[in-house]
Amino acid sequence: MADPHIVTAFDRDLEAVQAHVMRMAGLVEQALLQAAEALETGDEAMAARVRDGDRAIDDLEATIQTECARLLALRAPTASDLRVVLSVMRIAAALERSGDYAKNLAKRTLILTNMAPLGGTIGSVGRMARTVVQRLHETVDAYIARDTIVANDIRDRDRDVDQMYNSLFRELLTHMLEDPRNITAAMHLHFIAKNIERVGDHATAIAEQVIYLATGDLPGEDRPKADLTAGAGV
Amino acid sequence: MADPHIVTAFDRDLEAVQAHVMRMAGLVEQALLQAAEALETGDEAMAARVRDGDRAIDDLEATIQTECARLLALRAPTASDLRVVLSVMRIAAALERSGDYAKNLAKRTLILTNMAPLGGTIGSVGRMARTVVQRLHETVDAYIARDTIVANDIRDRDRDVDQMYNSLFRELLTHMLEDPRNITAAMHLHFIAKNIERVGDHATAIAEQVIYLATGDLPGEDRPKADLTAGAGV
């Protein structure tokens, strides 16, 4: 990228791979939003579509990993070019896992539609999902723009999602204590909330790849963390 | 590896990286076993050591990823040599996540020691942890030996751990329905069980890297799956 006028074979190959990454990111965001909507509206057909659609996301990841391996073998990139390929591989893996969480959300939605709804908890889960998708969207944009300022900002905002998860955890506990018949539904919603929080962690991991691209170093463990449920008695 | 008598610079570098992977695998196995033991015996000091020890595992992973990037840049490996480097990177990532789960187990243990014990459930969790560590150990051995027969066998046995998780899930539900005061402890144990199951999934992913090394292809989605809690009403 030193001279924008010289487009090498590597650049062309890379652009093709990055187009796949963008397409994959779009599919993952859509899967998460639709899974959350299916949960909120009890739309079983939509949940089933999200569940079945994960295969396309997995296939896209396999394509990206294969293309990256081919790029490494064929072009033997070094320095910043090598970093880009490695970061694409990590971002594809993070997106693939986020897609898995959307699929899991859809599968649990298909179970939850047959259970009594838990007050406004499902709405809170939906809001959490939309916040995380927004973060994922911004972080992929930051990656494409190589924007470390936005990436650092996204890293700092990880705390928001953790706090949403914590308050949801308390909400679920209340429902379970109130009526033991809520326990099974609450446990499924708890996993859903935890999985959405993990998508937020993957968004943060992608933001860290943006910083890695710019600096050659991955940011350390100093990232703010606010999931209290594993760190303090509830 | 075509001719065992010719040891290239690449082979020497790779051996050094693989030594790090073995050391990392040892640390992760130990962390999981000690975390499970701390949970079973209520040993808070041991749990705290596991929690704090995760940083060493993370550092080792960072070292491995850096060395692999250096190997790719310096030696520009192709064909099976390239596959080995890519598989080492994926295995290191799988081990790092398994270490995270051990740390999370330790953190939840520190909370659980202050709660009423849930019958024999903690013993079941301990057994599940030891089964998974055994699988992880075998799968890393299979990787070093490039033993696809063992790797395929490990892949097929993923079902065992999933079944252990399912019966644990039911056990926890019973405790919660019996006495709502058990709910918080049961939710922590539920996460612990789910995380141990995920370590089993990572062991399977490593086994798939052994197959990838031998064949150049990752095995598809036909892996047996038996986590029923996200696929059927409980």
Image: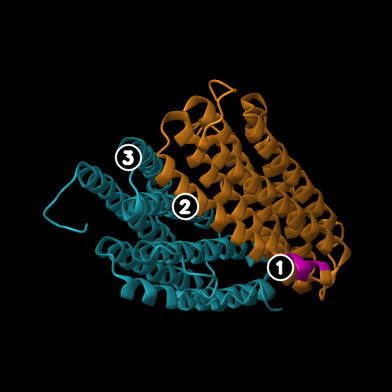
Chain colours: A cyan, B orange
Determine if residue B183 is in view.
Answer: no
Q: What type of secondary structure mainly makes up the magenta span?
A: helix
Report how far apart the C-alphas of labels 1 and 2 lie in the structure: 25 Å
Kind of residue at disc 2? Arg
Q: Residue at 55%, 59% (x, y): give it.
A: A115
Name the amino acid type tagged 3: Leu
Q: Do badges 1 and 2 share one subunit? A: no
**Mark 2 to mark 3 CA distance (whole Å):** 23 Å
Residue visible at 64% across and 27% down? Answer: B147
The chain containing the residue under callout 2 comes to A
The residue carrying pointer 1 sits among few (fewer than 14), some (14 to 19) or many (20 or more) residues within 10 Å by Cα, namely many
Would you identify the image quadrant in which residue A225 lies?
Answer: bottom right
Element under label 1? helix
Within the image, what quadrant is residue A69 found in? top left
Asked whether the residues under the numbered discs 3 and 1 touch, taking CB atoms below 8 Å apart as contact, a structural biologist would say: no
Q: Mark 1 highlights which residue?
A: B51
Whether discs 2 and 3 lie on one chain: the answer is: yes
User: The residue marked by circle 3 belongs to what chain?
Assistant: A
Q: Which residue is outermost to the left?
A: A5
Q: In the picture provided, is B216 more to the left or to the right than B188?
A: left
Q: Nearer the viewer, residue A34 or B136?
A: B136
Q: Nearer the viewer, residue B190 or B34?
A: B34
Residue A199, numbered label: none
Quadrant in which the N terminus of chain A appears: bottom left
Q: Magenta segment range?
A: B46-52
* SS at badge 2: helix
